[in-house]
Amino acid sequence: MTVIAYTVARPHLGKTLMVQSRSRQLAGIYARHGASVRVATVVSGPNAGCVAVMRAYPNFSVAAKAFQAINNDPAHIEFWRERDANPGADAVILRDINRTVYGDIQWDTHPVAHLRVYEISRDKLADAMKLLPDVSKLMKKAGVNVVGLVPITGENLSTMTLSYQFRSLDHWAESLDGVGTSDEFQALVAKAAKFGTLRTGFAMMSI
């Protein structure tokens, strides 16, 4: 299991570069306290143009200890003082948490992700998860890493997100043209529809 906390911000007009720079600064603080970090931009979907800062931990205990240490870090305190004095973005998600239920992240080698969010009641989650090995086996043929995630905090806890991770934007496009439109993949999508409803999708890449 991996625990992933994430923040998403929408830059003000003309402040995108500043927000990206600040996001890298914030990610550096998280990294100093043991997190695996990723700074990404949303390239398509409802929050296109937003910047996301993600930090991953091996379990909740490690995450909680890091959270406390970060909140007491003078660099972190000063970061938010500067941000409050000169804001460059609006928070879309200030801090939400997911955990992996299948696979694991490969941010270093697969910096592009296409995420599809299914609304699934908790009583059907176990059945839906039985499809993930078949999805992963099919996508692995195209070099795609598949991760299943469920929310711990957020507006809708009755969801599961599938993160399809790619080596590049070209790899993403090739996979959409190939395996993404194949009969095998569409058959799995149809099976998934028995357990939940596909609500939204978006793509993001590391910056």
Image (cartoon, rainbow, N blue to C red):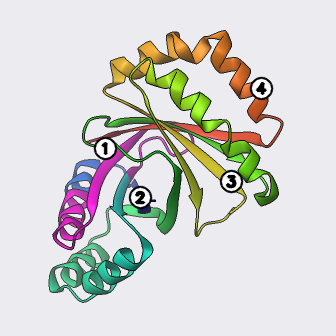
Residue 78 in the image: above or below residue 91: below
**Residue at disc 2, secondary structure:** strand
25 vs 12, left or right, is left
* Amino acid type assigned to the residue bearing label 3 in the image: Thr
Q: Which residue is mark 2?
A: 9
Q: Which mark is residue 107?
A: 1
Q: Which mark is residue 190?
A: 4
User: Residue 14 at x, y = what percent?
Assistant: 30, 48
Q: Earlier in the sequence, mark 1 or mark 2?
A: 2
Residue 119 in the image: above or below residue 171: below
Frontmost residue, 18 versus 57: 57
Q: Earlier in the sequence, mark 4 or mark 3?
A: 3
Q: CA distance from mark 4 to mark 3?
A: 17 Å
* Amino acid type assigned to the residue bearing label 2 in the image: Ala
Give the foreground label among 4 and 3. Answer: 4
What are the residue bounds of the magenta stretch? 22-51
User: Residue 73 at x, y = what percent?
Assistant: 19, 85
* Mark 4 touches mark 1? (CB < 8 Å): no
* Amino acid type assigned to the residue bearing label 1 in the image: Trp
Crowd class of label 4 (few under 14; some 14 to 19; many from 20; radius 10 Å):
few
73 vs 154, left or right, is left
Can residue 189 be seen at all in this image of the molecule?
A: yes
Q: CA distance from mark 4 to mark 1?
A: 29 Å
